[in-house]
Image: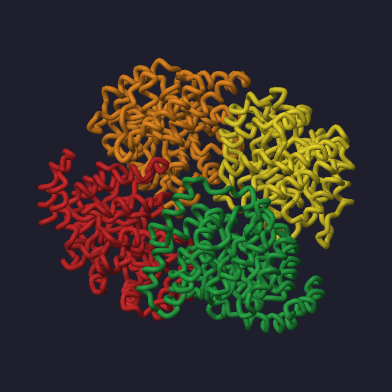
Chain colours: A orange, B yellow, C green, D red
Amino acid sequence: MLCARVWRGLSPLCRGGHLTAWTRTQSHTAAAARLDLSGIYPPIATPFTAKEDVDYRRLEENLQKYNKIPFKGLVVQGSNGEYPYLTEEERVEVVRTVRRSLPADKVLMAGSGCESTGATVQLTEKMAAVGADAVLVVTPCFYKGKMDSRALIQHFTKVADCSPVPVVLYSVPANTGLELPLDAVVQLSQHPNIVGLKDSGGDITRIGLTVHKTKTQDFQVLAGSAGFLMAAYCVGAVGGVCALANVLGRELCELERLCVSGCWEEARVLQQRLIEPNAAVTRKLGVPALKQAMEWFGFHGGACRSPLQPLTEAETQQLRRDFSSNGWL
Amino acid sequence: MLCARVWRGLSPLCRGGHLTAWTRTQSHTAAAARLDLSGIYPPIATPFTAKEDVDYRRLEENLQKYNKIPFKGLVVQGSNGEYPYLTEEERVEVVRTVRRSLPADKVLMAGSGCESTGATVQLTEKMAAVGADAVLVVTPCFYKGKMDSRALIQHFTKVADCSPVPVVLYSVPANTGLELPLDAVVQLSQHPNIVGLKDSGGDITRIGLTVHKTKTQDFQVLAGSAGFLMAAYCVGAVGGVCALANVLGRELCELERLCVSGCWEEARVLQQRLIEPNAAVTRKLGVPALKQAMEWFGFHGGACRSPLQPLTEAETQQLRRDFSSNGWL
Amino acid sequence: MLCARVWRGLSPLCRGGHLTAWTRTQSHTAAAARLDLSGIYPPIATPFTAKEDVDYRRLEENLQKYNKIPFKGLVVQGSNGEYPYLTEEERVEVVRTVRRSLPADKVLMAGSGCESTGATVQLTEKMAAVGADAVLVVTPCFYKGKMDSRALIQHFTKVADCSPVPVVLYSVPANTGLELPLDAVVQLSQHPNIVGLKDSGGDITRIGLTVHKTKTQDFQVLAGSAGFLMAAYCVGAVGGVCALANVLGRELCELERLCVSGCWEEARVLQQRLIEPNAAVTRKLGVPALKQAMEWFGFHGGACRSPLQPLTEAETQQLRRDFSSNGWL
Amino acid sequence: MLCARVWRGLSPLCRGGHLTAWTRTQSHTAAAARLDLSGIYPPIATPFTAKEDVDYRRLEENLQKYNKIPFKGLVVQGSNGEYPYLTEEERVEVVRTVRRSLPADKVLMAGSGCESTGATVQLTEKMAAVGADAVLVVTPCFYKGKMDSRALIQHFTKVADCSPVPVVLYSVPANTGLELPLDAVVQLSQHPNIVGLKDSGGDITRIGLTVHKTKTQDFQVLAGSAGFLMAAYCVGAVGGVCALANVLGRELCELERLCVSGCWEEARVLQQRLIEPNAAVTRKLGVPALKQAMEWFGFHGGACRSPLQPLTEAETQQLRRDFSSNGWL
């Protein structure tokens, strides 16, 4: 596999920190050049058995269904995959499993972010080795008071220097309590192995400015939620990683098509019907709701790992209302 | 003047709180029906003399220039007008002055929000009496912990019941620390005398959902800042009240034209060049920066009232950079 | 009346901004030196009639009762007095009324803060003229992004320069969304006419540091809420302005006595029983709850001005529980 | 070793979830009864070599020095130990190392919190097996929108059910963006194997209320920072886990002595001199500053793991000032 080979070649240099500018530019530019991120990705959920083990069989059944939807690819081990609740081995094994089922022309973007730079580099290597086409690297966040641009630039630069596959930055303030500062994004966009940003914050002014200030870099911005997907396209994003795509994947691909082809009026009508269902499975009711909705739409969702709790009866009713009042149930 | 006459008729009923549904519907529907809010409005700044008195002469000179720009109208006594620093008499007098200079076909929207419901009703009456076509009513905010939907619905309903002119809701969390809850907006959109919302929060998902959930009400949403104007049009807003229109009014009207006529690619290019100048005169450097930039572009800005301070030298340079790096200076 | 005379002497100088250091030091040091703030103050509520007019008769009946409690004085037109809902005339008239009923040896601290520096200076003058012994000046807050130390130091310095009576700074972030920065407090503490701070933020580390860094200035810190009164005494505060003193005034004076006399064990027992009732009438349920509780304890509370709403039935029950579960009802 | 034996006995029951109330009460009450938490604990820093490996030799040298200070014990793998940057093996190995050096009469409290309940249970078991006397369990926080009282009560109950040693709850909102709700604390305080709370939020009103509402449970509250240590004692806390104790350990033990013996005046003088140094090594400049200050005071601090950055020159000067201006350097 190319990715792994590239990594093996880079690895000693990287670890010693003596990677020359030449080596870095050559290998990374090649790797990065081929990767077009544009399109829709579901950040797939991780099904568990009743005993909270990863249910690989059900995962594959979901994948078979997703393969029939015109997604650009899948995000594996994003926030909706409950990655903080998986061991490192599980995180890698899930990616390996997905790679086996995923057609070669679909992009597999694997979440490899950890709190420390070193752990992130190691997991990035493993993700590439099992077939990830790109890694999605979340901002470290525990010491949030210290995660300023200086620290984050250093972190992502080191990861990108060492990664055998292209890196996508990931800013998700609702979970991390931290927004990747715009000046850091702009500087990091110049790295040959950093190809884009998943922005889940949803500040459309900031997204527009990110596109504007990185326009000379072939840097790709992905909307991190379906609620502002159309607006993100409008200001220059090229796609979306949307929890709701686990449930209403075809509809989100249709929204993409309408935006890309300039059918803004029809896009608006569809976009508006997606806002409440999206909010329900993300900000309002979270991963347990996403998994419940998946069940209603023919996918395996199932329970979450503890401490995430099943929905209460009232929450389930609210969830149903948010889909049905928009004509989806 | 019609507005004042309408008010005089309503006033006794209103004060007694015995306004019948019939009366209300009749008079307000008529009033509201005529008011199309679509378009661009500068929320005009208030020039002061060196002694911090309102400088009506300079204000009129600005108005002469604004009259040549294809604005839909003007917002007078919005946040950028330093209304919290003006006495009630000054607030009214400024509106009266603007009315005299403003062509009859331009909409004069006057800020009449106060902390108490009673004071807001009274100032609304006065604004209508001196010629406001509509009032812009900000959320009361001092007791923010108590300003839930129940209180805010009651407040705006009472104001709208009593107002002789249509009411536009105004949510500006950066100043008030409070966002008008969406369920309150939806309920208030059903009032015959409430015709729209100026949303300065900039959460594009929320703006899209507001449009969606009020679509049966002929309710008009205005973007409250130039930073997300194009995205707001994209999701269904009909115009914008933009501080930056005090400085780059023609350019914002051009952005409006591009959005309305579906020239999204050109719109995007223009929008992106406006984000940093807009941030500079609002969130980042505030009203003193807005007034400084007005001077550079041929308008009278001048100083602010205390405790707003003049820009420091470093801030002035930052402001200049935010305009010049985007090709405006 | 001395205060008014002092003001008349100062006024022309002040207005011109040419007050010499000598004059300022002389007159203000004299004024400030006499004012010992130590003790407990209720920030009194403003009773209204059914028509929402100020009910001066009921106010005086409350005052008669408060006069029998060993308060150091009263705060009039603080946040609990609904000052943002009163006209300037009402604000002054309420202070005048209180002065008439208040024994000369009790301190009358009048809230005179407005958004603009000029309006604050004028209202401060009026408050002094009707008998305030000191003014409590809240941070302006509408343009919160611009209310940095520079602006706030300028604002309070100007007010203190012009005020015929000592000034107490007032930081209440729950209402204003703004905390008076510590470096501003430290610098302002050096002004001869600024004698203290009411801190309603409740960050005890900050309160301790404020005492520490102003210890050479004879600067007095007052706790702004009963919830942290004992802890504030512990780290060096000299008293408290506590909404709950409108209801449980004797108990708070007893808590003061226990703290001042070093009876910390007894103080702790009493303090702990006051936390929930205090939270109920402030942060949790606000002024309407304060007024409801006043009724239960023999004072006139009555309704609030709109848009403040009466408690719901559920809220009233919660309020009752917060008092009864701590043995007060 | 007793802890491990107890665990082996409990483990099958626990894993099956069929632990009877009787068994639980018996074993846990015995375990919990012996543990008096009162006193001062440094949450020790983890020294690294130049290559970012754990430097066990330097760690032991620090421990020899700490053993001469009258601490109640040590917290190992708290936030200041950079635990999110250590592997699980390293976390356990550091605790094992500390246990070997720590006198038997000192309490070893080991951080064992992970995001998932299952991982936390497993790490808790391991920490007990290598000699922890208690575990400090931080709130899971990634899915903060879902970490309500229901989820947190379930999480901590499960961990406490399974833990062979007593559990101390840990709320540190500055890092987690989440405060353990008071109602959850109150309910969890009834669990026989949950003996206390480390509160790093510093809301003194909340700390007082926590003491009040758990007073029938022999539940012990520890201040999580030196900035409010005296105030916390004042309202009923029994000790403190203070980053600053890594640097000024004797001084914090002296502050404890003054508080416990009722020397409040002397305590206040000492407390006030500790606020700025404490803020510098926590909120303001973080773990890198803590480690730098340790070097100045004769301990091994050294560098942090990436992405934590070394202090800039300006930060180092600020740090020095915060110690020297209070007479410590």
Towards the viewer: A76 or B122: B122
What residue lies at 47% left-to-right and 45% top-to-bottom?
C314
From this viewpoint, is residue D290 visible? yes
From this viewpoint, is residue D295 visible? no
User: Residue A152 at what x, y percent from top left?
Assistant: 46, 48
Residue D152 shown left or right of residue D278 in the figure: left
Towards the viewer: B66 or C41: C41
User: Residue A250 at what x, y percent from top left?
Assistant: 46, 18
Residue D303 shown left or right of residue D24 in the figure: right
Name the quadrant of the N terminus of chain A: top left
Whether A221 is drawn above or below C38: the answer is above
Residue D76 shown left or right of residue C212 in the figure: left
Residue A304 shown left or right of residue B281 in the figure: left
Numbered-mark total: 0
Whether D318 is drawn above or below A318: the answer is below
What residue lies at 33% left-to-right and 38% top-to-bottom?
A308
Name the quadrant of the C terminus of chain A: top left
Q: Quadrant of the rendered structure where residue D75 is?
A: bottom left
User: Residue D70 at what x, y percent from top left?
Assistant: 26, 73
Q: Quadrant of the rendered structure where residue D42 is?
A: bottom left
User: Residue A229 at what x, y percent from top left?
Assistant: 54, 28
What residue lies at 21% left-to-right and 45% top-to-bottom?
D122
What residue lies at 38% left-to-right and 77% top-to-bottom?
C263
Towards the viewer: A181 or B291: B291
